[in-house]
Amino acid sequence: MTGEPPLAQQQRAVVELYVRSKWIKASLALEDENLFIEYAHNKHDQPILNESIKPSNTNDEPIQNNGSTTNSTPDTITSQKRIIKISKPDNTGLGISIKGGRENRMPILISKIFPNMPADQTGQLYVGDAILSVNGKDLQHVSHEEAVQILKKAGRDVELEVRYLREVNVLMQKQGSTYSRKQNQQSQDNLTESNISSSSSQNKEMSSSKKNLANNSPPSSNDSILYETKRISLRLCYIFRRSSITNDNLVLSSTTTSMPLVTAPSSVSNGSILDIVLPYAQTCYSVRFVDDMHARKWFHIIHSKISRCLLEILPEIEEHFCVARNATEVKALGWLTEQVNNEEPKSWKPVFLVLTDAEICFLCCAPVSKQTCREPDIVYPILSTRLVQATRDATNDTDISLLSLRAGTKFGVVSHIFRVETKADLNYWNKAINQSLQSAVVRTKEVVFPCKWNNRTCKLFLHYEHGFTLYSDPTDSVTSGGNTPSIGNVRLLWQQPFEKLRSSADDSEHLLTLDFHGEEGVVELDFGTSPKPFVFHLHAFLSAKAARIGLIG
Protein backbone atom coordinates (compact mmCIF):
# COMPACT_ATOMS: atom_id res chain seq x y z
CA MET A 1 0.00 0.00 0.00
CA THR A 2 1.26 3.48 -0.87
CA GLY A 3 -0.87 5.45 1.55
CA GLU A 4 -2.16 5.13 5.10
CA PRO A 5 -5.83 4.48 5.83
CA PRO A 6 -7.85 7.44 7.18
CA LEU A 7 -7.96 5.96 10.71
CA ALA A 8 -4.17 5.75 10.90
CA GLN A 9 -3.96 9.42 9.92
CA GLN A 10 -6.23 10.26 12.81
CA GLN A 11 -4.07 8.35 15.29
CA ARG A 12 -1.54 11.09 15.87
CA ALA A 13 -2.15 14.55 17.30
CA VAL A 14 -0.62 17.56 18.97
CA VAL A 15 -2.04 17.84 22.50
CA GLU A 16 -1.21 19.28 25.90
CA LEU A 17 0.07 17.15 28.77
CA TYR A 18 -0.40 18.01 32.44
CA VAL A 19 3.07 17.89 34.03
CA ARG A 20 3.99 19.38 37.40
CA SER A 21 0.90 21.58 37.66
CA LYS A 22 1.32 22.96 34.13
CA TRP A 23 -0.14 22.22 30.72
CA ILE A 24 2.67 21.77 28.20
CA LYS A 25 2.73 21.04 24.48
CA ALA A 26 3.10 17.34 23.65
CA SER A 27 2.57 14.93 20.77
CA LEU A 28 0.40 11.83 20.84
CA ALA A 29 0.73 8.80 18.56
CA LEU A 30 -1.02 5.46 18.55
CA GLU A 31 0.50 2.34 17.05
CA ASP A 32 -1.09 -1.09 17.54
CA GLU A 33 -1.76 -1.32 21.29
CA ASN A 34 0.87 1.27 22.26
CA LEU A 35 0.27 4.96 22.97
CA PHE A 36 3.30 7.28 22.68
CA ILE A 37 3.44 10.62 24.47
CA GLU A 38 6.37 12.94 23.81
CA TYR A 39 7.11 16.24 25.51
CA ALA A 40 10.11 18.53 25.97
CA HIS A 41 12.03 19.76 29.01
CA ASN A 42 15.32 21.55 29.57
CA LYS A 43 18.51 20.29 31.17
CA HIS A 44 17.29 21.52 34.55
CA ASP A 45 14.42 19.03 34.22
CA GLN A 46 11.79 21.76 33.87
CA PRO A 47 8.93 21.18 31.39
CA ILE A 48 8.89 23.52 28.41
CA LEU A 49 5.70 25.58 28.23
CA ASN A 50 3.58 25.83 25.12
CA GLU A 51 5.41 28.82 23.64
CA SER A 52 8.94 27.36 23.97
CA ILE A 53 8.91 23.86 22.44
CA LYS A 54 11.36 22.96 19.69
CA PRO A 55 12.06 19.38 18.53
CA SER A 56 15.26 17.65 19.53
CA ASN A 57 16.57 14.09 19.29
CA THR A 58 14.13 11.48 20.56
CA ASN A 59 15.28 9.36 23.48
CA ASP A 60 13.79 6.49 25.42
CA GLU A 61 13.74 7.95 28.94
CA PRO A 62 10.34 8.14 30.68
CA ILE A 63 8.45 11.31 31.40
CA GLN A 64 8.36 12.56 34.95
CA ASN A 65 6.28 10.48 37.30
CA ASN A 66 6.57 8.85 40.69
CA GLY A 67 8.39 5.93 39.12
CA SER A 68 10.47 7.62 36.42
CA THR A 69 14.11 8.55 36.16
CA THR A 70 13.41 12.27 36.35
CA ASN A 71 11.12 12.36 39.33
CA SER A 72 11.11 14.65 42.32
CA THR A 73 11.43 12.48 45.39
CA PRO A 74 9.42 13.50 48.49
CA ASP A 75 11.51 14.56 51.46
CA THR A 76 9.38 12.41 53.75
CA ILE A 77 10.89 9.15 52.51
CA THR A 78 14.54 10.12 52.91
CA SER A 79 16.50 7.61 55.03
CA GLN A 80 13.39 5.64 55.89
CA LYS A 81 13.14 1.94 55.10
CA ARG A 82 10.20 1.10 52.87
CA ILE A 83 8.62 -2.18 51.79
CA ILE A 84 7.50 -2.18 48.16
CA LYS A 85 5.45 -5.09 46.80
CA ILE A 86 5.46 -5.70 43.05
CA SER A 87 3.39 -8.22 41.10
CA LYS A 88 4.52 -8.86 37.54
CA PRO A 89 3.64 -11.26 34.73
CA ASP A 90 5.90 -14.15 33.82
CA ASN A 91 8.80 -13.42 31.43
CA THR A 92 8.75 -9.75 32.41
CA GLY A 93 11.53 -8.01 34.31
CA LEU A 94 11.04 -5.53 37.11
CA GLY A 95 11.96 -2.68 34.77
CA ILE A 96 14.98 -1.31 36.65
CA SER A 97 18.72 -0.93 36.20
CA ILE A 98 21.06 -1.23 39.17
CA LYS A 99 24.55 -0.07 40.06
CA GLY A 100 26.91 -0.81 42.90
CA GLY A 101 27.81 -3.99 44.74
CA ARG A 102 30.39 -5.35 47.14
CA GLU A 103 33.25 -4.99 44.67
CA ASN A 104 32.45 -1.29 44.24
CA ARG A 105 32.05 -0.69 47.99
CA MET A 106 28.56 0.61 47.28
CA PRO A 107 25.06 -0.59 48.12
CA ILE A 108 22.88 -1.99 45.34
CA LEU A 109 21.30 1.18 43.90
CA ILE A 110 18.47 1.73 41.44
CA SER A 111 19.99 3.78 38.63
CA LYS A 112 17.09 3.69 36.16
CA ILE A 113 13.39 2.91 36.23
CA PHE A 114 11.96 2.12 32.82
CA PRO A 115 8.52 3.38 31.77
CA ASN A 116 5.39 1.25 31.98
CA MET A 117 7.25 -1.64 33.60
CA PRO A 118 6.17 -3.18 36.95
CA ALA A 119 8.56 -1.06 39.07
CA ASP A 120 7.42 2.14 37.36
CA GLN A 121 3.75 1.23 37.74
CA THR A 122 3.98 1.00 41.54
CA GLY A 123 4.78 4.71 41.72
CA GLN A 124 6.73 3.97 44.91
CA LEU A 125 10.30 3.40 43.72
CA TYR A 126 12.87 6.10 42.94
CA VAL A 127 16.25 6.45 41.28
CA GLY A 128 18.69 6.49 44.20
CA ASP A 129 16.82 3.85 46.22
CA ALA A 130 19.20 1.35 47.81
CA ILE A 131 17.81 -2.21 47.65
CA LEU A 132 18.38 -3.76 51.08
CA SER A 133 16.65 -7.08 50.50
CA VAL A 134 14.60 -9.01 47.93
CA ASN A 135 11.88 -11.34 49.27
CA GLY A 136 13.72 -11.36 52.61
CA LYS A 137 17.12 -12.15 51.03
CA ASP A 138 19.81 -9.68 52.19
CA LEU A 139 21.46 -7.63 49.41
CA GLN A 140 23.62 -5.38 51.57
CA HIS A 141 26.81 -7.44 51.19
CA VAL A 142 26.48 -9.09 47.78
CA SER A 143 28.34 -8.47 44.55
CA HIS A 144 26.75 -6.76 41.57
CA GLU A 145 26.32 -10.03 39.66
CA GLU A 146 24.82 -11.78 42.70
CA ALA A 147 22.28 -8.97 43.02
CA VAL A 148 21.39 -9.26 39.32
CA GLN A 149 20.74 -13.00 39.66
CA ILE A 150 18.70 -12.61 42.86
CA LEU A 151 16.48 -9.99 41.22
CA LYS A 152 16.05 -12.06 38.05
CA LYS A 153 14.99 -15.11 40.06
CA ALA A 154 12.63 -13.25 42.40
CA GLY A 155 9.48 -14.64 40.75
CA ARG A 156 6.13 -13.03 40.03
CA ASP A 157 5.51 -11.48 43.44
CA VAL A 158 8.51 -9.46 44.61
CA GLU A 159 8.93 -7.70 47.93
CA LEU A 160 11.71 -5.10 47.99
CA GLU A 161 13.06 -3.46 51.13
CA VAL A 162 14.56 -0.14 50.06
CA ARG A 163 16.00 3.05 51.51
CA TYR A 164 16.36 6.29 49.56
CA LEU A 165 19.87 7.84 49.42
CA ARG A 166 19.41 11.41 48.21
CA GLU A 167 23.09 12.28 47.89
CA VAL A 168 23.68 9.24 45.66
CA ASN A 169 20.77 10.23 43.40
CA VAL A 170 22.22 13.74 42.94
CA LEU A 171 25.62 12.24 42.05
CA MET A 172 24.12 9.83 39.50
CA GLN A 173 22.15 12.64 37.87
CA LYS A 174 25.31 14.71 37.44
CA GLN A 175 27.21 11.78 36.00
CA GLY A 176 24.36 10.81 33.69
CA SER A 177 23.79 14.29 32.22
CA THR A 178 26.80 13.98 29.86
CA TYR A 179 25.84 10.75 28.12
CA SER A 180 22.48 9.38 29.24
CA ARG A 181 20.55 11.14 26.46
CA LYS A 182 22.13 9.13 23.63
CA GLN A 183 19.45 7.16 21.80
CA ASN A 184 19.27 3.36 22.35
CA GLN A 185 22.01 3.42 25.03
CA GLN A 186 21.79 0.39 27.35
CA SER A 187 23.39 -0.14 30.74
CA GLN A 188 25.42 -3.33 31.31
CA ASP A 189 23.49 -3.91 34.54
CA ASN A 190 20.02 -3.60 32.95
CA LEU A 191 17.59 -6.07 34.51
CA THR A 192 14.75 -5.57 32.05
CA GLU A 193 14.03 -6.94 28.61
CA SER A 194 15.99 -5.27 25.83
CA ASN A 195 12.99 -3.84 23.96
CA ILE A 196 12.83 -0.61 25.92
CA SER A 197 13.91 1.58 23.02
CA SER A 198 11.52 2.89 20.45
CA SER A 199 11.46 0.85 17.25
CA SER A 200 12.01 2.50 13.88
CA SER A 201 8.30 2.50 13.21
CA GLN A 202 7.65 4.10 16.59
CA ASN A 203 10.24 6.80 15.86
CA LYS A 204 8.55 7.37 12.50
CA GLU A 205 5.23 7.99 14.29
CA MET A 206 6.77 10.48 16.67
CA SER A 207 8.81 12.32 14.03
CA SER A 208 5.61 13.30 12.26
CA SER A 209 4.21 14.71 15.50
CA LYS A 210 7.48 16.51 16.22
CA LYS A 211 7.14 18.33 12.88
CA ASN A 212 3.72 19.53 13.99
CA LEU A 213 5.22 20.78 17.24
CA ALA A 214 7.98 22.57 15.36
CA ASN A 215 5.52 24.34 13.08
CA ASN A 216 3.73 25.81 16.10
CA SER A 217 6.80 26.83 18.09
CA PRO A 218 9.32 29.68 17.83
CA PRO A 219 13.04 28.90 17.43
CA SER A 220 14.97 27.84 20.49
CA SER A 221 18.37 26.41 21.31
CA ASN A 222 18.67 22.64 20.98
CA ASP A 223 21.39 22.68 23.61
CA SER A 224 18.89 23.34 26.40
CA ILE A 225 15.92 21.22 25.27
CA LEU A 226 15.58 17.47 25.67
CA TYR A 227 12.71 15.22 24.65
CA GLU A 228 11.07 12.54 26.76
CA THR A 229 9.02 9.75 25.17
CA LYS A 230 6.57 7.69 27.17
CA ARG A 231 5.35 4.40 25.70
CA ILE A 232 2.10 3.24 27.27
CA SER A 233 0.89 -0.26 26.53
CA LEU A 234 -2.90 -0.06 26.56
CA ARG A 235 -3.30 -3.62 27.83
CA LEU A 236 -5.33 -3.41 31.06
CA CYS A 237 -5.31 0.40 31.04
CA TYR A 238 -8.37 2.58 31.65
CA ILE A 239 -9.45 5.79 29.94
CA PHE A 240 -11.65 8.38 31.65
CA ARG A 241 -13.25 11.27 29.78
CA ARG A 242 -14.00 14.46 31.66
CA SER A 243 -17.56 15.58 31.35
CA SER A 244 -17.91 18.87 29.48
CA ILE A 245 -20.59 19.94 31.97
CA THR A 246 -19.25 18.87 35.37
CA ASN A 247 -15.87 19.19 37.11
CA ASP A 248 -15.54 15.52 37.99
CA ASN A 249 -12.36 14.40 39.77
CA LEU A 250 -10.49 11.13 39.42
CA VAL A 251 -9.08 9.52 42.59
CA LEU A 252 -6.45 6.83 42.25
CA SER A 253 -6.32 3.80 44.53
CA SER A 254 -3.02 4.81 46.12
CA THR A 255 -4.34 8.18 47.29
CA THR A 256 -7.13 9.47 49.48
CA THR A 257 -7.45 12.83 47.75
CA SER A 258 -7.84 13.95 44.16
CA MET A 259 -4.66 14.00 42.10
CA PRO A 260 -3.61 17.57 41.31
CA LEU A 261 -3.38 16.72 37.61
CA VAL A 262 -7.12 16.11 37.47
CA THR A 263 -8.23 19.70 37.90
CA ALA A 264 -8.10 21.72 34.70
CA PRO A 265 -8.36 25.53 34.61
CA SER A 266 -11.95 26.63 35.02
CA SER A 267 -11.84 28.65 31.81
CA VAL A 268 -11.27 25.49 29.75
CA SER A 269 -13.93 22.89 28.99
CA ASN A 270 -13.21 19.64 30.81
CA GLY A 271 -14.77 17.75 27.93
CA SER A 272 -11.53 18.03 25.98
CA ILE A 273 -9.46 16.17 28.63
CA LEU A 274 -8.75 12.43 28.71
CA ASP A 275 -7.18 10.66 31.70
CA ILE A 276 -5.25 7.46 30.93
CA VAL A 277 -4.83 5.26 34.02
CA LEU A 278 -2.17 2.54 34.06
CA PRO A 279 -3.00 -1.05 35.18
CA TYR A 280 -1.88 -0.59 38.81
CA ALA A 281 -4.20 2.46 39.08
CA GLN A 282 -1.42 4.48 40.70
CA THR A 283 -0.31 6.52 37.67
CA CYS A 284 -2.44 8.71 35.44
CA TYR A 285 -1.61 10.78 32.37
CA SER A 286 -3.94 13.66 31.51
CA VAL A 287 -3.98 15.00 27.97
CA ARG A 288 -5.97 17.95 26.67
CA PHE A 289 -7.20 18.29 23.11
CA VAL A 290 -8.01 21.36 21.10
CA ASP A 291 -11.76 20.75 21.45
CA ASP A 292 -14.34 18.25 22.66
CA MET A 293 -14.82 16.73 19.19
CA HIS A 294 -11.17 15.63 18.94
CA ALA A 295 -11.17 14.39 22.54
CA ARG A 296 -14.30 12.34 21.91
CA LYS A 297 -12.81 10.83 18.73
CA TRP A 298 -9.59 9.84 20.50
CA PHE A 299 -11.52 8.52 23.47
CA HIS A 300 -13.42 6.06 21.28
CA ILE A 301 -10.26 5.00 19.42
CA ILE A 302 -8.32 4.31 22.64
CA HIS A 303 -11.34 2.78 24.39
CA SER A 304 -11.86 0.31 21.54
CA LYS A 305 -8.16 -0.63 21.64
CA ILE A 306 -8.37 -1.30 25.38
CA SER A 307 -11.54 -3.39 24.92
CA ARG A 308 -9.88 -5.45 22.19
CA CYS A 309 -6.84 -6.08 24.40
CA LEU A 310 -9.14 -7.27 27.21
CA LEU A 311 -10.73 -9.86 24.94
CA GLU A 312 -7.28 -11.13 23.94
CA ILE A 313 -6.13 -11.70 27.53
CA LEU A 314 -9.49 -12.93 28.85
CA PRO A 315 -8.40 -16.63 28.79
CA GLU A 316 -5.35 -15.82 30.92
CA ILE A 317 -7.39 -13.86 33.49
CA GLU A 318 -10.03 -16.60 33.51
CA GLU A 319 -7.33 -19.15 34.31
CA HIS A 320 -6.13 -16.99 37.22
CA PHE A 321 -9.65 -16.79 38.67
CA CYS A 322 -10.26 -20.51 38.18
CA VAL A 323 -7.19 -21.23 40.29
CA ALA A 324 -7.49 -18.41 42.83
CA ARG A 325 -11.29 -18.20 43.30
CA ASN A 326 -12.51 -21.64 42.13
CA ALA A 327 -14.45 -19.91 39.38
CA THR A 328 -15.79 -21.93 36.47
CA GLU A 329 -16.10 -19.03 34.05
CA VAL A 330 -15.48 -15.28 33.85
CA LYS A 331 -18.69 -13.73 32.54
CA ALA A 332 -17.55 -10.11 32.25
CA LEU A 333 -14.62 -7.91 33.22
CA GLY A 334 -13.37 -4.38 32.79
CA TRP A 335 -12.81 -0.97 34.34
CA LEU A 336 -15.54 1.21 35.76
CA THR A 337 -15.31 4.26 38.01
CA GLU A 338 -17.11 4.21 41.36
CA GLN A 339 -18.52 7.36 42.91
CA VAL A 340 -16.81 8.09 46.23
CA ASN A 341 -18.73 11.21 47.30
CA ASN A 342 -22.09 12.87 46.79
CA GLU A 343 -20.94 16.48 46.83
CA GLU A 344 -19.98 18.61 43.86
CA PRO A 345 -17.55 18.19 42.25
CA LYS A 346 -18.02 14.44 42.25
CA SER A 347 -15.03 12.17 42.71
CA TRP A 348 -14.64 8.83 40.95
CA LYS A 349 -12.29 5.96 41.73
CA PRO A 350 -11.23 3.40 39.08
CA VAL A 351 -12.37 -0.13 39.97
CA PHE A 352 -11.64 -3.25 37.95
CA LEU A 353 -14.77 -5.44 38.07
CA VAL A 354 -14.66 -9.18 37.42
CA LEU A 355 -17.94 -11.08 37.19
CA THR A 356 -17.59 -14.85 37.53
CA ASP A 357 -20.27 -17.53 37.54
CA ALA A 358 -20.65 -17.14 41.33
CA GLU A 359 -19.17 -13.79 42.45
CA ILE A 360 -18.66 -10.13 41.69
CA CYS A 361 -15.09 -9.11 42.56
CA PHE A 362 -13.84 -5.54 43.01
CA LEU A 363 -10.11 -5.07 42.36
CA CYS A 364 -8.19 -1.87 43.07
CA CYS A 365 -5.95 -2.61 40.08
CA ALA A 366 -6.05 -4.77 36.97
CA PRO A 367 -5.67 -8.55 37.51
CA VAL A 368 -1.98 -8.66 36.61
CA SER A 369 -1.19 -11.74 38.72
CA LYS A 370 -2.79 -14.68 40.53
CA GLN A 371 -2.15 -12.90 43.82
CA THR A 372 -4.30 -9.97 42.69
CA CYS A 373 -7.09 -12.38 41.71
CA ARG A 374 -6.79 -14.29 44.97
CA GLU A 375 -7.30 -11.26 47.18
CA PRO A 376 -9.89 -8.83 45.70
CA ASP A 377 -10.76 -5.72 47.69
CA ILE A 378 -14.48 -6.63 47.82
CA VAL A 379 -16.33 -9.83 46.93
CA TYR A 380 -20.10 -10.33 46.79
CA PRO A 381 -21.88 -13.60 45.99
CA ILE A 382 -23.79 -12.95 42.78
CA LEU A 383 -27.05 -14.10 44.46
CA SER A 384 -26.65 -11.38 47.11
CA THR A 385 -26.61 -8.56 44.56
CA ARG A 386 -29.21 -6.61 42.67
CA LEU A 387 -28.76 -4.34 39.66
CA VAL A 388 -30.77 -1.14 39.84
CA GLN A 389 -32.01 0.30 36.58
CA ALA A 390 -29.34 2.48 34.98
CA THR A 391 -29.96 6.22 34.73
CA ARG A 392 -28.51 9.08 32.75
CA ASP A 393 -27.43 11.92 34.98
CA ALA A 394 -28.67 15.23 33.63
CA THR A 395 -25.35 16.81 34.66
CA ASN A 396 -23.34 14.40 32.48
CA ASP A 397 -22.85 13.90 28.74
CA THR A 398 -25.45 11.83 26.93
CA ASP A 399 -23.06 8.88 26.45
CA ILE A 400 -22.31 8.60 30.18
CA SER A 401 -24.66 6.54 32.39
CA LEU A 402 -24.84 5.72 36.07
CA LEU A 403 -25.14 2.07 37.06
CA SER A 404 -26.17 1.22 40.61
CA LEU A 405 -25.30 -2.14 42.16
CA ARG A 406 -26.75 -3.07 45.56
CA ALA A 407 -25.59 -5.94 47.76
CA GLY A 408 -27.30 -7.51 50.76
CA THR A 409 -24.85 -8.19 53.59
CA LYS A 410 -25.18 -9.16 57.26
CA PHE A 411 -24.63 -5.48 58.05
CA GLY A 412 -27.37 -4.26 55.72
CA VAL A 413 -27.52 -2.99 52.14
CA VAL A 414 -24.35 -1.69 50.51
CA SER A 415 -24.73 0.46 47.39
CA HIS A 416 -22.15 1.12 44.67
CA ILE A 417 -22.73 3.75 41.97
CA PHE A 418 -20.62 3.31 38.86
CA ARG A 419 -20.07 5.64 35.96
CA VAL A 420 -20.22 3.87 32.57
CA GLU A 421 -18.52 5.70 29.71
CA THR A 422 -20.37 4.30 26.69
CA LYS A 423 -23.78 2.85 25.83
CA ALA A 424 -22.11 -0.35 24.62
CA ASP A 425 -20.45 -0.79 28.04
CA LEU A 426 -23.78 -0.21 29.77
CA ASN A 427 -25.50 -2.90 27.69
CA TYR A 428 -22.54 -5.24 28.26
CA TRP A 429 -22.72 -5.03 32.07
CA ASN A 430 -26.53 -5.05 32.22
CA LYS A 431 -26.76 -8.19 30.14
CA ALA A 432 -23.85 -9.97 31.86
CA ILE A 433 -25.06 -9.35 35.43
CA ASN A 434 -28.68 -10.26 34.74
CA GLN A 435 -27.78 -13.44 32.86
CA SER A 436 -25.24 -14.47 35.51
CA LEU A 437 -27.81 -13.94 38.25
CA GLN A 438 -30.38 -16.17 36.53
CA SER A 439 -27.79 -18.85 35.74
CA ALA A 440 -26.57 -18.86 39.34
CA VAL A 441 -30.11 -19.46 40.64
CA VAL A 442 -30.70 -22.40 38.28
CA ARG A 443 -27.31 -23.88 39.12
CA THR A 444 -27.54 -23.39 42.91
CA LYS A 445 -31.24 -24.33 43.27
CA GLU A 446 -31.20 -24.20 47.08
CA VAL A 447 -29.71 -22.03 49.84
CA VAL A 448 -29.99 -22.42 53.61
CA PHE A 449 -30.24 -19.68 56.26
CA PRO A 450 -30.05 -20.24 60.04
CA CYS A 451 -32.71 -18.34 61.97
CA LYS A 452 -35.14 -18.51 64.91
CA TRP A 453 -38.89 -19.00 64.80
CA ASN A 454 -40.99 -18.96 67.97
CA ASN A 455 -37.74 -19.05 69.98
CA ARG A 456 -36.67 -22.22 68.19
CA THR A 457 -33.36 -22.51 66.40
CA CYS A 458 -34.23 -23.42 62.81
CA LYS A 459 -32.94 -23.62 59.28
CA LEU A 460 -34.85 -21.92 56.49
CA PHE A 461 -34.42 -23.57 53.07
CA LEU A 462 -35.06 -21.48 49.96
CA HIS A 463 -35.53 -23.76 46.94
CA TYR A 464 -35.93 -22.70 43.31
CA GLU A 465 -38.82 -25.12 42.75
CA HIS A 466 -40.31 -25.81 46.19
CA GLY A 467 -40.23 -22.36 47.77
CA PHE A 468 -39.85 -21.98 51.56
CA THR A 469 -39.22 -24.86 53.97
CA LEU A 470 -38.48 -24.44 57.67
CA TYR A 471 -36.80 -27.28 59.60
CA SER A 472 -35.96 -27.45 63.26
CA ASP A 473 -32.26 -27.48 64.14
CA PRO A 474 -31.19 -30.73 65.91
CA THR A 475 -29.05 -28.68 68.29
CA ASP A 476 -32.11 -26.80 69.58
CA SER A 477 -33.02 -27.85 73.13
CA VAL A 478 -36.70 -26.96 72.65
CA THR A 479 -37.02 -29.29 69.66
CA SER A 480 -35.07 -32.13 71.26
CA GLY A 481 -37.14 -31.96 74.46
CA GLY A 482 -34.12 -31.53 76.69
CA ASN A 483 -32.55 -34.79 75.43
CA THR A 484 -29.17 -35.06 73.75
CA PRO A 485 -29.61 -33.53 70.27
CA SER A 486 -29.35 -35.88 67.31
CA ILE A 487 -30.05 -35.81 63.60
CA GLY A 488 -33.20 -37.82 64.17
CA ASN A 489 -34.78 -34.88 66.01
CA VAL A 490 -34.95 -32.71 62.87
CA ARG A 491 -38.61 -31.89 62.16
CA LEU A 492 -40.41 -30.17 59.34
CA LEU A 493 -42.09 -27.11 60.89
CA TRP A 494 -43.81 -25.65 57.84
CA GLN A 495 -43.53 -25.38 54.06
CA GLN A 496 -44.91 -22.79 51.60
CA PRO A 497 -44.57 -22.36 47.82
CA PHE A 498 -43.56 -19.04 46.31
CA GLU A 499 -47.09 -18.55 45.01
CA LYS A 500 -48.45 -18.24 48.57
CA LEU A 501 -46.19 -15.33 49.48
CA ARG A 502 -48.26 -12.14 49.66
CA SER A 503 -45.54 -9.75 50.91
CA SER A 504 -42.33 -9.54 52.91
CA ALA A 505 -40.82 -6.89 55.17
CA ASP A 506 -37.77 -6.50 57.39
CA ASP A 507 -36.33 -4.06 59.91
CA SER A 508 -32.82 -4.15 58.33
CA GLU A 509 -31.43 -5.27 61.70
CA HIS A 510 -32.48 -8.89 62.38
CA LEU A 511 -36.24 -9.45 61.93
CA LEU A 512 -38.05 -10.60 58.77
CA THR A 513 -41.79 -11.11 58.28
CA LEU A 514 -43.30 -13.24 55.52
CA ASP A 515 -47.02 -12.88 54.86
CA PHE A 516 -48.56 -16.07 53.40
CA HIS A 517 -52.11 -16.81 52.38
CA GLY A 518 -53.83 -19.49 54.45
CA GLU A 519 -53.31 -20.90 57.92
CA GLU A 520 -49.73 -19.81 58.48
CA GLY A 521 -50.56 -16.14 58.02
CA VAL A 522 -47.68 -13.87 59.01
CA VAL A 523 -44.41 -15.59 59.96
CA GLU A 524 -41.72 -13.71 61.87
CA LEU A 525 -38.12 -14.91 61.66
CA ASP A 526 -35.10 -13.70 63.61
CA PHE A 527 -31.82 -13.95 61.65
CA GLY A 528 -29.56 -12.52 64.38
CA THR A 529 -27.99 -10.17 61.82
CA SER A 530 -29.48 -8.19 58.97
CA PRO A 531 -31.90 -10.35 56.95
CA LYS A 532 -30.86 -8.56 53.72
CA PRO A 533 -28.83 -11.53 52.35
CA PHE A 534 -32.01 -13.65 52.48
CA VAL A 535 -34.08 -10.82 50.95
CA PHE A 536 -31.66 -10.45 48.04
CA HIS A 537 -31.55 -14.22 47.47
CA LEU A 538 -35.35 -14.27 47.48
CA HIS A 539 -35.44 -11.46 44.92
CA ALA A 540 -32.96 -13.36 42.71
CA PHE A 541 -35.01 -16.56 42.87
CA LEU A 542 -38.28 -14.77 42.07
CA SER A 543 -36.63 -12.86 39.18
CA ALA A 544 -35.25 -16.09 37.72
CA LYS A 545 -38.67 -17.75 37.92
CA ALA A 546 -40.29 -14.72 36.27
CA ALA A 547 -37.68 -14.79 33.49
CA ARG A 548 -38.28 -18.50 32.94
CA ILE A 549 -41.96 -17.99 32.21
CA GLY A 550 -41.29 -14.90 30.10
CA LEU A 551 -42.55 -12.19 32.45
CA ILE A 552 -39.23 -10.33 32.25
CA GLY A 553 -36.52 -10.27 29.61
Image (cartoon, grey):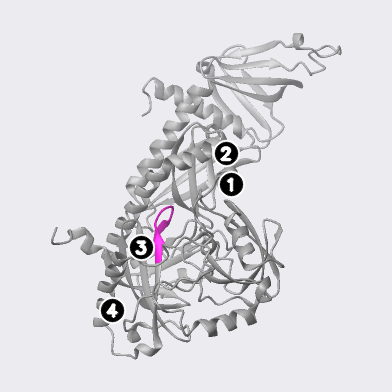
- Above or below residue 9? Residue 359 is above
- Above or below residue 97? Residue 432 is above
Q: Secondary structure at mark 2?
A: helix
Split into 4 quadrants, where in the image is the N terminus? Answer: bottom left
Label 3 to label 4: alpha-carbon separation: 18 Å
Q: Is residue 542 magenta?
A: no
- In the rendering, which numbered label is found on residue 35? 3
Circle 2 packing at 10 Å, graded few (<14), some (14-19), many (20+), is: some
- Above or below residue 221? Residue 531 is above
Label 4 to label 1: alpha-carbon separation: 44 Å
Residue kind at label 4, given as amino acid type: Leu
Which label's residue is closer to the chain start, 3 or 4?
3
Q: Position of residue 512 (x, y in %)?
A: 64, 29
Q: Which residue is mark 2?
A: 324
Q: Which residue is mark 1?
A: 371
Q: Which residue is mark 4?
A: 213
Which label's residue is closer to the chain start, 4 or 1?
4
